[in-house]
Image (cartoon, coloured by chain):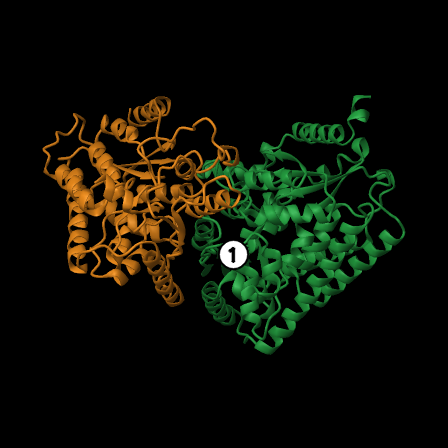
């Protein structure tokens, strides 16, 4: 597994549609959210250039790049339509140009796949896909194996994610375990991620003891699972969008994977004004959510814009809404204590 | 001496024009005429060409801040559920509109716009304008903002003539198509038809205007001492820029050129004994523009540079090569990014600092505004490598609640003292 991950293309960006790379014939691992915050090492040449209020995932990625975490990977592909990814790309390029990062690390590529159903965007996206494929061909030959086989695996993975979400919603699977496994699977090549997801599905995990209250956890992406544990002290975490959007229908080919991405309503940079709330309403209903838990990162400039509409939606649907405030990407004990206090206060 | 400093006649003319324009706009809006509410980095030229009034989000934001109304609306926004760390410069007009209280708005507030337009150059713009769309019911034209894959640092040279290569044909194809879609939308709203020939003439007038501003910038940069305060140059550039290509705007740019030339020829300067030339990096400090003159007396230090004048040339001049709509796409396609993102911002600012003989840069760092706050570390480095002392002010362009004028002044004064010490260590010890 290690060697395959090393040979894989690294992708950076929340909600990166790895299906596109898999179907294009390349292995890809998603390194947007490391398991733990990356600690600054003595002698960092780049840390002084990273603003203290920089997006935590961008910071972690750049520090890992400096520490050589991706030196064996042939390339890093950044998803333009992910929050912070453009900055991650530009900072990495500039740090190289300034001689603060070595030139011989992975090749860097910005993938301008855009979110819009408009025809001119579809034309642009098709050309962007061709540019990506040309770039990939230059750095690495396509992997062996048929497209059909890859399609089957992509389909299996989507199915497993769907089954896990269902088990979680049904209270048969701990939300913390599901979150941690989904996050871990992001860092893995396709075959290995299927194994890990399959193992989780097959495990008979006992639900933590909790009153039967059904929560959805929404807002900024999280990388650490601490908040999930806290939430499960109070009820069932039935819907969790923190480690990826609900799996869409598996694409039948590369072009459909591109189309699915461009139309993804829950993507935070989606251009259609009401897309997010409209897409969320049926999800909350489907999972019989009783209370939405909302949180944002301390550096957030994006998710917070949804909050008043989210609260209004909950009012309309007659479900609860609890704002947990600022939660770190990898919440520490102080942060979790505050979240627990807020939850307890709101529910008493 | 500062006490003798007399403002330009052009400044009074520009603000008077804007007052009259604002009054006539209010009358047009009150009579039910539709207007477009748009971000600064969108193709205003299309609205102007089709005679649709435009209110620019960031201009309106600066108006609210200058009238000391920002704190009220920012406090209200938090009560509405928008958290305190969201960006404010681009959102303040939305908060004012959501509040709706005419007592707390310039002009008693804006009526609902007929059309909205923004570029997705920042992650939050589609959300801010999405709120506007829900509030007003107006259609929203969102322009995509794909990145340049290998950005060369010296954009202001490459984009001047060879913009097709520099910005990339595919990015330009996309934006041109989106601008053409916008044209259709504005045509539908106004009932007027877009005329390509007239538009080419209009774009040529804009180019002429920006070339006049380029001359003004060159003159100020080369003058022995800075002849005009940036607090004056900002309205003298930005008011014509909001009306770019109009007869008034072009005439005004020429008047500014004439008046500045006369000042330089007459050896008129902000400070006769000018010792330190400073640049203000970032958007304006709209609620406290007096800050720019605060160091003239004690330090003989003047702000000689803000981005608005030189950017009128470097950011706008894009020869049309027979296709004015495409040239417009080239003007807009990376507009805001060039001012803030690496490698562009640092390289341009260092080049400008050299041209203007800048000693010290004061940079506003808005921590809660990613497009403006990110990349400031690279800018600081570029300036320091160009031999420029840098002072960073953690502040927001419109949020006076966070502004501690005394502390900010003290930081700049410390920078000036460091600068004096490094330039003339013997003087500084005495």
The quadrant where residue A223 appears: top left
Q: Position of residue A60 (x, y in %)?
A: 40, 35
Chain coloured orange in this rendering: A
How many numbered circles are shown? 1
B255 w.r.t. A52: above or below? below
Q: Quadrant of the N terminus of chain A?
A: top left
Q: Position of residue B64 (x, y in %)?
A: 61, 45
B389 w.r.t. A105: above or below? above
Judge whether residue B332 can be spotted in this image: yes
Q: Residue furthest right?
A: B266
Instruction: Report in which chain the residue with disc 1 lies.
Output: B
Q: Residue at x 65, y 54 (%)?
A: B311
Q: Residue furthest front?
A: A104
B248 w.r.t. A292: above or below? below
The residue tagged with tag 1: helix, strand or loop? loop
A204 w.r.t. B355: above or below? above
- Label 1: how many residues lie within 10 Å, few (<14), some (14-19) or many (20+)? some
Q: Position of residue B253 (x, y in %)?
A: 74, 60
The quadrant where residue B208 appears: bottom right
Q: Quadrant of the C terminus of chain A?
A: top left
Q: Is residue A344 left or right of residue B285?
A: left
Q: Nearer the viewer, residue B137 or A293?
A: A293
In the rendered image, which residue does mark 1 sit on? B112
Q: Residue at x 15, y 44 (%)?
A: A163
Q: Nearer the viewer, residue B95 or A315?
A: B95
Judge whether residue B34 can be spotted in this image: no
Q: Is residue A156 left or right of residue A110?
A: left
Q: Position of residue B345 (x, y in %)?
A: 58, 48
Q: Nearer the viewer, residue B389 or A163?
A: B389
* Picture colour for chain B: green
């Amino acid at each position: 597994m290690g060697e395959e991950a090393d040979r894989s293309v690294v992708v950076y960006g929340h909600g990166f549609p790895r299906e596109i790379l898999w179907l294009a014939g390349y292995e890809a691992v998603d390194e947007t959210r490391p398991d733990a915050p990356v600690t600054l090492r003595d002698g960092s040449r780049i840390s002084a250039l990273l603003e203290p209020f920089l997006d935590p995932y961008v910071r972690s990625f750049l520090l890992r790049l400096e520490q050589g975490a991706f030196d064996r990977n042939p390339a890093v592909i950044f998803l333009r339509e992910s929050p912070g990814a453009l900055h991650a790309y530009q900072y990495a390029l500039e740090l190289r140009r300034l001689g603060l990062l070595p030139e011989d690390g992975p090749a860097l590529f910005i993938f301008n796949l855009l979110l819009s159903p408009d025809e001119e965007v579809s034309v642009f996206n098709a050309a962007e896909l061709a540019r990506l494929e040309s770039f990939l061909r230059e750095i690495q030959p396509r992997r062996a194996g048929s497209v059909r086989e890859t399609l089957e695996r992509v389909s299996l993975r989507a199915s497993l994610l769907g089954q896990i979400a269902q088990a979680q919603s049904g209270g048969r699977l701990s939300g913390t375990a599901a979150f941690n496994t989904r996050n871990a699977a992001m860092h893995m090549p396709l075959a290995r991620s299927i194994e890990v997801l399959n193992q989780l599905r097959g495990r008979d995990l006992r639900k933590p003891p909790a009153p039967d209250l059904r929560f959805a956890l929404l807002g900024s992406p999280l990388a650490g699972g601490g908040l999930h544990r806290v939430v499960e002290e109070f009820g069932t975490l039935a819907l969790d969008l923190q480690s990826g959007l609900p799996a869409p229908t598996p694409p039948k080919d590369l072009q459909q994977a591109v189309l699915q991405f461009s139309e993804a309503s829950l993507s935070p940079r989606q251009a259609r004004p009401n897309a997010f709330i409209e897409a969320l309403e049926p999800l909350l209903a489907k999972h019989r959510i009783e209370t939405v838990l909302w949180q944002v990162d301390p550096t957030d400039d994006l998710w917070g814009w949804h909050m008043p509409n989210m609260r209004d939606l909950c009012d309309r649907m007659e479900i609860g809404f609890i704002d947990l405030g600022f939660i770190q990407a990898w919440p520490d004990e102080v942060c979790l204590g505050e979240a627990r206090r807020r939850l307890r206060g709101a529910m008493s | 001496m500062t006490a003798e400093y007399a403002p330009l006649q052009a400044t009074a003319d520009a603000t008077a024009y804007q007052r009259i324009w604002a009054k006539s706009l209010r009358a047009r809006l009150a009579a039910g005429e539709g207007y477009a509410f748009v971000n600064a980095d969108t193709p205003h030229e299309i609205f102007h060409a089709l005679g649709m009034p435009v209110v620019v989000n960031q201009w309106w934001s600066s108006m609210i801040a200058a009238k000391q109304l920002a704190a009220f609306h920012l406090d209200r926004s938090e009560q509405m559920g928008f958290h305190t760390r969201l960006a404010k410069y681009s959102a303040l007009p939305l908060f004012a509109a959501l509040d709706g209280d005419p007592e707390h708005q310039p002009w008693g507030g804006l009526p609902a716009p007929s059309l909205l337009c923004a570029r997705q150059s920042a992650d939050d713009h589609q959300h801010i304008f999405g709120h506007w769309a829900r509030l007003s019911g107006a259609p929203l034209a969102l322009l995509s903002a794909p990145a340049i894959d290998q950005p060369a640092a010296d954009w202001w040279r490459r984009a001047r003539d060879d913009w097709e290569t520099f910005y990339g044909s595919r990015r330009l194809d996309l934006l041109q198509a989106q601008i053409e879609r916008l044209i259709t939308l504005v045509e539908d709203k106004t009932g007027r038809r877009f005329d390509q020939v007239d538009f080419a003439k209009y774009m040529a007038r804009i180019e002429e205007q920006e070339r006049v501003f380029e001359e003004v910038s060159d003159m100020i940069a080369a003058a022995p001492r800075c002849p005009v305060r940036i607090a004056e140059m900002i309205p003298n550039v930005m008011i014509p820029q909001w009306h770019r290509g109009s007869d008034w705007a072009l005439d005004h740019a020429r008047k500014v050129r004439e008046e500045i030339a006369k000042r330089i020829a007459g050896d008129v300067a902000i400070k006769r004994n000018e010792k330190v030339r400073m640049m203000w990096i970032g958007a304006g400090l709209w609620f406290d523009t007096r800050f720019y003159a605060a160091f003239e007396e004690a330090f003989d230090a003047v702000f000689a540079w803000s981005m608005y004048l030189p950017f009128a040339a470097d950011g706008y001049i894009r020869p049309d090569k027979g296709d004015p709509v495409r040239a417009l796409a080239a003007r807009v396609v990376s507009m805001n990014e060039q001012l803030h993102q690496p490698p562009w911002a640092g390289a341009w600012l260092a080049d400008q600092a050299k041209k203007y003989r800048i000693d010290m840069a004061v940079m506003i760092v808005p921590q809660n505004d990613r497009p403006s706050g990110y990349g400031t570390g690279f800018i600081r480095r570029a300036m320091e490598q160009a031999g420029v002392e840098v002072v960073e002010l953690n502040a927001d362009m419109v949020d006076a609640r966070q502004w501690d004028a005394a502390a900010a002044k003290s930081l700049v004064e410390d920078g000036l003292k460091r600068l004096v010490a490094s330039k003339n260590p013997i003087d500084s010890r005495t």
